[in-house]
Image (tube, rainbow, N blue to C red):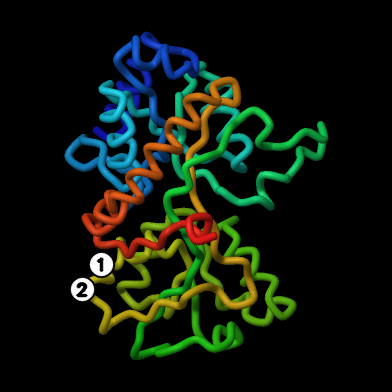
């Protein structure tokens, strides 16, 4: 049913709007196309065939401010973020050619914004405008408190199994740490839900992942006596801000969304959205600078 609903949403998009649009065009059409990642709780997912999640709720705030309806564009993740931005924002999906007006969960990170495409030498973000930082996210490690009460060094995983999702930064960092010291104790998963399930069943002693996602999936708000969460992953860049992306052709839309998110931050609406999903809200680093 979830696949059917997603296909229906994409078909609706295909026959209504194929291009990212200006702020005025969005208002005239009475709808805004918002891209969020598919099956990615607590940020964006389907519950009883209805879009839910932190990014979904924040997207609804933007639509409400414009007095328009939302057409959700659930998208999978490609090999890298540059591909996601190309397929979703500035070039369009390879199959149905749809472009979103705005996309959530984009790194607001100066290192990333300066990255260039090896083949062309162009900035990976040249065709998009990234604004509206709304959250600080981080990679962390969760453990069973009775098994690993605290982590002072990653070397502890020479004696304990830890689960990671394949091809993520924690996977790369842990696999190469100390020349592969505990590589045999790293359990790789292509499905993060399976990793969470194995961790709950104590088939693995620890799991690395996104802080907000681990808090949500482990129901940490009512299981703090069972689980220990690190602040970050030792010896790895673990924290960054998340924001929105629009086509660089429509700067007015980008600045408008930035203003709406700033207001939602000041009014504590974003904090309330996180609280609704039982996830700790960590304000963007950019807001404190």
User: Which secondary structure lies at badge 2?
Assistant: helix
Residue 188 seen by the camera: yes
Give residue 224's position: percent from left, percent from top. Answer: 27, 79
Residue 41 seen by the camera: no
Q: Residue at x 25, y 62 (%)?
A: 278
Which of 199/269 is in front?
269
Give residue 287's position: percent from left, percent from top. Answer: 48, 56
Quarter of the figure that contains the C terminus: bottom right
Residue 101 lies left or right of residue 84; in this view the side is: left
Label 1 environment density (alpha carbons within 10 Å; few <14, some 14–19, many ≥20): some
Label 2 environment density (alpha carbons within 10 Å; few <14, some 14–19, many ≥20): few
Residue 222 lies left or right of residue 183; in this view the side is: left
Mark seen at residue 222? 2
Vertical comparison of 159 with 2: above or below: below
User: Which secondary structure lies at badge 1?
Assistant: loop
Q: Residue at x 43, y 34 (%)?
A: 257
Quick check: marks 2 and 1 in contact, CB under 8 Å? yes
Which of 236/208 is in front?
236
Q: Residue at x 58, y 24 (%)?
A: 90
Residue 217 lies left or right of residue 159; in this view the side is: left
- Residue placed under numbered mark 1 in the picture: 219
Q: CA distance from mark 2 to mark 1?
A: 6 Å
Q: Residue at x 38, y 24 (%)?
A: 33
Q: How many marks?
A: 2
Vertical comparison of 131 with 70: above or below: below
Vertical comparison of 172 with 202: above or below: above
Quarter of the figure that contains the N terminus: top left
């Amino acid at each position: 049913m979830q696949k059917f609903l997603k296909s229906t949403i994409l078909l609706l998009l295909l026959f209504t709007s194929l291009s990212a649009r200006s702020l005025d065009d969005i208002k005239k059409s009475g709808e805004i196309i918002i891209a969020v990642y598919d099956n990615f709780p607590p940020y964006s997912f389907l519950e009883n065939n209805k879009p839910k999640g932190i990014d979904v709720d924040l997207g609804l705030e933007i639509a409400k401010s414009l007095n328009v309806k939302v057409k959700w564009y659930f998208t999978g993740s490609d090999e890298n973020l540059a591909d996601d931005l190309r397929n979703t924002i500035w070039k369009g999906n390879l199959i149905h050619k749809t472009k979103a007006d705005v996309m959530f969960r984009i790194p607001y990170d100066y290192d990333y914004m300066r990255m260039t495409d090896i083949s062309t030498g162009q900035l990976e973000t040249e065709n998009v405008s990234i604004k509206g930082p709304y959250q600080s996210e981080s990679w962390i490690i969760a453990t069973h408190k009775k098994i690993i009460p605290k982590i002072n060094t990653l070397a502890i995983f020479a004696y304990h199994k830890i689960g990671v999702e394949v091809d993520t930064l924690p996977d790369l960092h842990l696999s190469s740490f100390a020349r592969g010291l505990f590589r045999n104790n790293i359990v790789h998963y292509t499905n993060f839900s399976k990793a969470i399930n194995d961790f709950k069943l104590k088939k693995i002693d620890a799991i690395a992942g996104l802080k907000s996602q681990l808090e949500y999936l482990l129901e940490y708000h009512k299981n703090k006596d069972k689980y220990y969460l690190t602040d970050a992953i030792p010896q790895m860049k673990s924290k960054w801000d998340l924001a929105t992306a629009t086509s660089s052709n429509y700067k007015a839309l980008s600045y408008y969304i930035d203003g709406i998110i700033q207001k939602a931050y000041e009014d504590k609406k974003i904090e309330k959205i996180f609280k609704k999903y039982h996830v700790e809200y960590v304000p963007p680093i950019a807001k404190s600078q």
